[in-house]
Amino acid sequence: MAGSTLSEIATPEITELAPLIVLLPMIAFAVILFLGRVFNGNPTWKNTVKEGGIIALGVMGAVLVLSLLLIADFIGSVQAGHDSVFHWFTSGVWDGTSAGVSTDKFGFGLYVDHITVMLLFVAAFLCLLINVFSIGYMNTDPINDNRNHRFYAEFTLFCSGMLGMVLADSFLWLFIFWEIMGLCSYLLIGFYYERPSAAYAAKKAFLTTRVGDVFLMIGLVMLWDLFGSLDYTVVFDSANIEHVAEHSAGTLQWALGLMFIGAVGKSAQFPLHVWLPDAMEGPTPVSALIHAATMVNAGLYLVARMFPFFGAEALHGDLADLAYIIAVVGGITAVMAAAIAFVQMDLKKVLAYSTMSQLAYIFTGLGCALYLANTLDWHHNEKDHYIVIVAFGAALFHLFNHAMAKGMLFMASGSVIHEVHHAHHHLHHHDDHGDGHGDDHHDEEFDAQSMENMGGLASKMPITATAMLVGSASIMGLPLIGGFWSKEGIIANAWRVAQDDPRFLLPAMCVLIGAGMTGFYMSRMWLKTFAGKPNNEVAAHVGPTNIWIKTPLFILTFVSLSSVFLAGMGFTHWAPDENYAFMQEKSLVDGIIYEMQHAFANSDAYFFIITYIAIAMGAVAGPGLAMALYGGKLEDGESAKPWMTPVISLNAWVMNRFNFDNSAFAESTLAVALQNRLYIDHYYDMAMVKIVAGLSNKVAQADSDVIDGTIKTIETGSQSLSTAVRSLTTGSARDYILMVAVGMLAIFMLVWGVA
Amino acid sequence: METTQAFSSEFYTALLPELMLFAGLLALIIIPNLGKGTFRIPGTQIRLPWFMGGERYALTSNPHLPAWIATITLTGAFLAVGDSLRGGIDSLLVMSSDADEAKELLMINGFSRVFELIFFGALALASFASMNRLKVEGIGAKLDVEKLYNNRRQADFYILMLTCGLGMSVVALAQDLFVLFIGLELASFSTYVLVAFLKETKAGAEAGMKYFIVGSVASGVGLYGLSMLYLWAGSLQFDVLAATFATSGTEPLPLIGIGFVLVGFGFKVSAAPFHFAAPDAYAGASSPVAGVLATASKAMGMVGLIRMLLIVAAPESSEGSAVWLVCLGALAALTMTWGNLAALGSTNPKRMLAYSSVAHAGYMLAGLTAVGAWTWDPSFAGQEGEAALMVLTALLFHMVVLVAFKLGAFLVLSILESDGDASRLSSLGGLAKREPLLAFGMFIFMISLAGVPPMAGFLSKLMVIMGIVNVGVGTGAESLSDFHWVWWLALLMVLNSAVSVFYYLRVAVVMFFDAPEEGREGPLPSGWQVRTSIFACVLVTILVGIFGDSILEMCRSAAESLTTNW
């Protein structure tokens, strides 16, 4: 980061293997696609190799191992205080000095710093788990038969895109991998392309993110114009930043602002958020992959990557407005998405809006951290340095916690949907699964994703219910679990900035209210799904799920619960600070005690109050309201696991004591507006139909007439030329000799003429 | 540069690969004839065993034997050349005697060695693969005449392969027009017969005949050109000719001579309009032989052209060289365009590859034009030779790697030929289903021919184009009108490459998306030899594209060793 020395990583063996992290999945993509085409339908391919699932699994395992080695290596070399750049290949393309052709460099390298390491772990780890889940989810559904290889191929390419984006050493490569992800999201969301809604959703996701990408591209071009390069080593160099700051700090702010729009599109923030809920049309592993492990984190990563600009001394105060915009976009999205999540009946859509809202938290956190870095004198003042680091760390930590929890929640929801669907099948057809009748989870008359068809599943799917419970708690920020540590940090920092700059009261209020709203909609989701009596016959017949699905849920539950240890190890310190000596400043126990004190007994009265308001809203008011409205006792004779029983009992008690009728609200204009996603999609569609479609028709007309016309002419022209030329090859040796003679005479004439 | 005389010990060491070929040739003639034959002393009843003729031994009558002898010999020669290249070789000039007025005969240096590498490599792969193409039908069992005949003529085929190699390497080594011509004809006659080897098929006999007739005419014209040069300079020596050219190269007689030589070698590299027999020959010959024609034989034509044009006919700043430069440039433009256009509509994969080979010849001629332009055009006088060296390196590199993906493509077709037929595009249908790895290999060859990164074909084509552009732009040119006209050849080459992608990828489309022809759904004929050869070609195509540095280095030093004489 700012002013740090860049050096080669200590042990070259690992770094030389590190490009494999990107290359292996990319190769797996080609291999799976090829083998899948060739062996489609082959029983070994289908049952043993799982149509490529096992290949993908092996590759993702190798990727995780390599990533861990790289991370261990990085942590080792960081003790010496270095960031690392590794040029994997650089080649001067044509040294034309002797002949006047300009020389340029082209290469791909790795840039490894704290942010990279953290996201690398998140991506590699979750991709592996989701891969395991996919084998349990995709391969057991007859509708996917003989096309799972397409899924696994696109899956690995997607992972490759994310890993490459995280590891890239320049904004150019970041953009290239960013676009690979964009392509894969299109392919994967539209995996069931025969279904019009999926095709529509894929198109929508692709086009919406494309809007952001255009701005990102313009931003990158502007950045290149300022620095003459997009390499991190060049643009983050403090001398270069100083040089740019002298003349064109304003232009730099515009460039970064345009790049931020790209991040807004990718991370589904207002106003480019419309694609994310529709993206639930993809198979559930894809939802987990896009909304937890990879794609949406890309936008966050891009903003976090901008930290060196905001932290540069030379740009002190110049970028504060952009930081504010980032925080405000986050704040607005957090509240808006949470409000829409209130009324969703579709299990996955609740999670989709929850993702949007939580990402907005991270954006707010990043915005505040960037604001602090830009306005405080943190290079020289130790206390300010601490404040900046902790603010940035809180945002990164929330990214980590959210990715883990949301990955788990999506997989758990997938598990529920899968089993509800099977139960439905079982009940209504009483014949084999392999009857080919299933239309995945979208039968005309039955919607397996709707919470209307669930309820009381806590006793039937204990592992899934537990995972969902822990995941929800982590997202809500229940004290001590998962996202609590980071969410409190984000809220506290937003209010800290609001002290300095009253403009920030808006995002600060948003995240505070959002905490209560999160508590409500996440509780609502869990209670409607797992507590109470089964809503219908189908829900009563759901059975437990298979081992491939259970394993990742189990692991992630554990990870979310152990977030307290990460906090104790000072995650918020070492994640953003390259000079922080990992695990050396405090022991684990001291660290946990320190974090506890900080969280629950802050010596500063201001933060003390804020913390308790946030806890009260997120852990008491929100869930309490949800409990009063939804859920209830399980069916008589059914019992949940002991750790879920208190929750259900509490729920039943609250429901009895405080139940009220909310039907008036449910029919209000606001609720209808929320049902319709605040009509934003509606207006976008209208704008599309009226303006864009009209324009595109004109362009298409011109395309088919002018461009295609030209191409067609060339094509027919060259084909007829080809025929003419080949007609000279008569097959008679006499004619051939004649042609030799003609050629000879031509040369003779030419020479004669010149000589 | 060291010199030595013919038949000295140094001569034998340096010509080890050719001697190996010669030994292999003798072995091929003698070994299949070893038997229990006896010789009766006249007038007596005493019979002395003399081991020739009569009833053959089991080993010597084995029809597989000639193929193995040829393959091992060619591989050995290939390795010997490779070994001598690895150590970095000094130039060795072979003189006819140690007298003062001795004539230069052969030159062994990095340049000639690279060509030997190409010849022996291509021929070794082709003969190895031919084991599956030229079928041996069981040994000792009751055979009908035709099959027995097939077994009997195995030796003939491989003898021709070896003589072909020998002739080619003589062309690469020659320092004298007479030696050059001898080598050329030795190689040519071998290829004529090889093309017609499948004389039972109508196409084979007809193709061989046409190839022979047109080839003879071209050779005749070439020889006429050579004789003009002799008439003018009074010598057949390259060094004498070059020296004479430097002083009086603008006279019409030598220029017309060079022009006629261009016709002779133009046929060998199949430059338009001398290429007409080539598609017929490729289509009629068995695929491995067609592969040899498209790679080794073409390289032989190129080495002849390089020698004639760059060494003999191009002394420094002679105005006369500008004449052949224009001829060559026109020939290059015509050849690449013609080849690509004709390939566009070809539905016979072998003819398509033949036309593609014509197009590649055009690219190489364009490169050669650029070398000439840079080195001898007066407008470049006094500037460094780096750009020309680069184009020459690129040309050599192109010819080396072409062996992998052009021959490889023919070998894939050879398996299909054994399966029945490879003369229609639809014969390739469903190859991906029938034998996925083979389809994958063919796909690699096609995209390498089209010049898609990271295949070897991309690198070589890119280098040739960049080299020509460098020459065309020169050092001072700032606007289009200042560019040397060879720059337009590079542009034409790019356009042609774009056109060529169509017919290369059409093969991929047929292989991967079309159904097999009726009755050809089953597995392809077995044969590990041809598959091993294809695998080697795939490996080279991919690896050289990525790790080609050492081969590039080799070609560069070869190009340097040629230019030290400039």
Image (cartoon, rainbow, N blue to C red):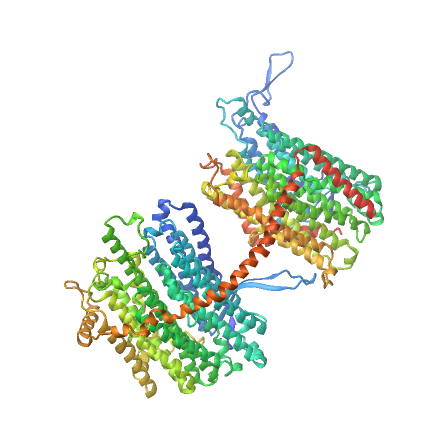
User: Looking at the picture, how far across and down is residue B197, in whole percent?
Assistant: 61, 30
Of residue A707 and residue A727, the one placed in the foreground of this image is: A707
User: Looking at the picture, how far across and down is residue B386, in whole percent?
Assistant: 70, 57
Q: Is residue B55 above or below residue A451?
A: above
User: Looking at the picture, how far across and down is residue A724, in whole percent?
Assistant: 65, 42
Of residue A469 and residue A602, the one placed in the foreground of this image is: A469
Q: Is residue B520 above or below residue A538?
A: above
Left or right of B412 on screen, residue A529: left
Left or right of A490 on screen, residue A165: right
Left or right of A344 on screen, residue A374: right
Report the residue that reaches farthest toward the bottom.
Answer: A605
Residue A604, image quadrant: bottom left
Residue at 54% over, 36% down = B422
Residue A534 in view: yes
Residue at 59% over, 19% down = B38
User: Looking at the picture, how far across and down is residue A418, in whole percent?
Assistant: 29, 57
